[in-house]
Amino acid sequence: MLTRDEDVLAAAESWREAGRDVAIATVVETWGSAPRPVGSHLVIDGEGNFLGSVSGGCVEGAVVEEAAEVIAEGAPRMLEFGVADETAWRVGLSCGGRIKVYVEKLA
Amino acid sequence: MRLDVLKAMNSARAERRAGAIVTRLADGEQRFVAAERIDADPLGLQLEGALRMGKSAAVSVEGEDYFLTVQAPAPRLTLIGAVHISQALAPIARIAGLDVSIIDPRTAFATPDRFPDTPISAKWPDEALAEAPLDRYTAICLLTHDPKIDDPALAIALRADCFYIGALGSRKTHAKRVERMRARGFDEAALARIHAPIGLDIGAVSPAEIAVSIIGEIVASLRKKPLRAESAAA
């Protein structure tokens, strides 16, 4: 069963209602060939469980790590990924695109 | 994201109402705007555009960056006829992301055995569609070959402005159907919205191949241009 972005947001609500810490990551901009469209969501809980996708698997690991910090600190942050990025050797998009991901805590 | 904002969005989705979350990216300030309230919103113009396309978008207004998370109702597919094509079309459409349901008053056809994963109603279309009304985010396929069953559903679909209306049958069958609908008072513009013969012309022969041609036509209607009713309203 494929997970739709709306289902991901429904899960965010029910996870929070169940008392879990939750962060929501959203693709807000893409340049060139990007794996997931603007508006795609990844929902992450305090334990590192996640649902949805912002890149089809390329940068999810990094987003989950950042989400843990957003949950701890509370302030939203903007992440950028792409081959031109200095982090490209670590995580990046093999398709050559760039994406901007907004990560916020659900409070 | 504020939980109350997310709840407003999710409940709009559950009730098949359109709307959007506006997030100011500089500081995370947020609100949910229901589709019927966008005129009163400072970002009304941008919200109108995003909702019409059914797509979330980043916008820049007076030097401030915002993100609009759009909630457009999930597309549905209603099949009139629990027939052989429906047995292939229901699972294909579900994988493509449509919520599928089937209506067929002939109880011999409308059995859970034949459609184990699809909600199925053995009521007549006018009764079944009164319980689960069609809307502009719904596609409908008329597949029974029986005017007693197909025609009432077609009339309801035309009035509900379904984004896709497909009708099975040859050109000759369709010409007769158009005649009957004309007699019911539908004009040429309305009748031109019926896709018939149903499906893209890919030379489909088997029920499964016909199902593929139908889902292709539905996806094209959904994605290639803004939903007809919404572009007309713009």
Image (tube, coloured by chain):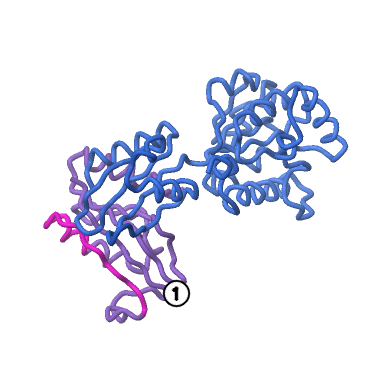
Chain colours: A purple, B blue
Q: Residues within 10 Å of mark 1 (few under 14, many from 20)?
A: few
Instruction: Using the image as rendered, state which of residue B41 and residue B75 is in the foreground.
Output: B41
Instruction: State the residue at coordinates (64%, 22%).
Output: B125
Residue B194 is inside the magenta segment: no
Image location of residue B40, percent across then percent down: 35, 39
Is B42 on the left-hand or right-hand side of B28? right
What residue is shown at x 80% (from left), y 37% (from top)?
B169
Question: Residue B190 in the image: x percent, y percent?
Answer: 71, 34
* Bounds of the magenta segment: A66-83
Q: Quadrant of the C terminus of chain A?
A: top left
**In the image, is residue B132 above or below residue B204?**
above
> Disc 1 marks which residue?
A95
* Image quadrant assignment for residue B101: top right
Q: Residue at x 31, y 74 (%)?
A: A91
- Local SS, label 1: loop
Q: Which picture quadrant has residue A54?
A: bottom left
